[in-house]
Amino acid sequence: MTDSVYVGNAGRDAALDRGWLLGHFKDASDPRHSEDVEIKWGVHPRGDERARWVTGEERTTLQVLISGRFRVELPGRSVLLAEQGDYVVWGRGVDHSWYAEEESVLLTVRWPSVPGYQVP
């Protein structure tokens, strides 16, 4: 790594930080540090599900299906991502949860990068 360049592999790097590649949680000297956006390479085994719904969301989220079959639960609506490239966007204030119907890989982009949203 040089001062402003980082070259890596999403699959390998994601394993180091619960899937997150970029965001406020990276060291300030790392080019992957950002308070504006978070990016995650999420690998979910079949049957993986969010431990509980996210409520009081303060960020906007984009999820893009790379492979698999993945369901996103939103208030009053269930969205199935089934074909490579399917995506869903939801804004601030939208509660959500998810479930991997098959082994799935997703790219998630959230903004802004806000500390304190880790689910135990």
Image: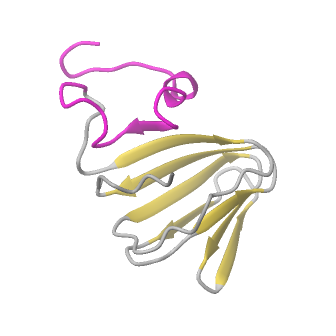
* 101 horizontally vs 89: left or right: right
Task: Decide: is 29 above or below 69.
Answer: above
Q: Give the colour scheme shown.
A: secondary structure
Tell me where residue 63 appears, x and y as whole percent.
54, 56
* 6 horizontally vs 39: left or right: left
Asked if the stretch drawn in magenta spans residue 16, the answer is yes
Q: Residue at x 23, y 48 (%)?
A: 35
Tell me where residue 24 appears, x and y as whole percent.
27, 43
Asked if the stretch drawn in magenta spans residue 87, the answer is no
Extreme residue in the top direction: 1
Tell me where residue 84 appears, x and y as whole percent.
70, 50
Which residues make up the magenta segment? Answer: 1-30
Q: Residue at x 32, y 42 (%)?
A: 23
Q: Residue at x 48, y 43 (%)?
A: 40
Task: Decide: is 35 above or below 78.
Answer: above
Given residues 93 and 53, the one toward you in this image is 53
* 10 horizontally vs 77: left or right: left
Given residues 62 and 73, the one toward you in this image is 73
- Dividing the picture into quadrants, the one containing residue 42 is top right
- Dividing the picture into quadrants, the one containing residue 49 is bottom right
Given residues 98 and 85, the one toward you in this image is 98
- Dividing the picture into quadrants, the one containing residue 59 is bottom left
Q: Residue at x 44, y 52 (%)?
A: 118
Task: Decide: is 52 above or below 25.
Answer: below
* 57 horizontally vs 3: left or right: right
Tell me where residue 100 appears, x and y as whole percent.
74, 54
Image quarter where the N terminus lies is top left
Magenta stretch, overall SS: loop
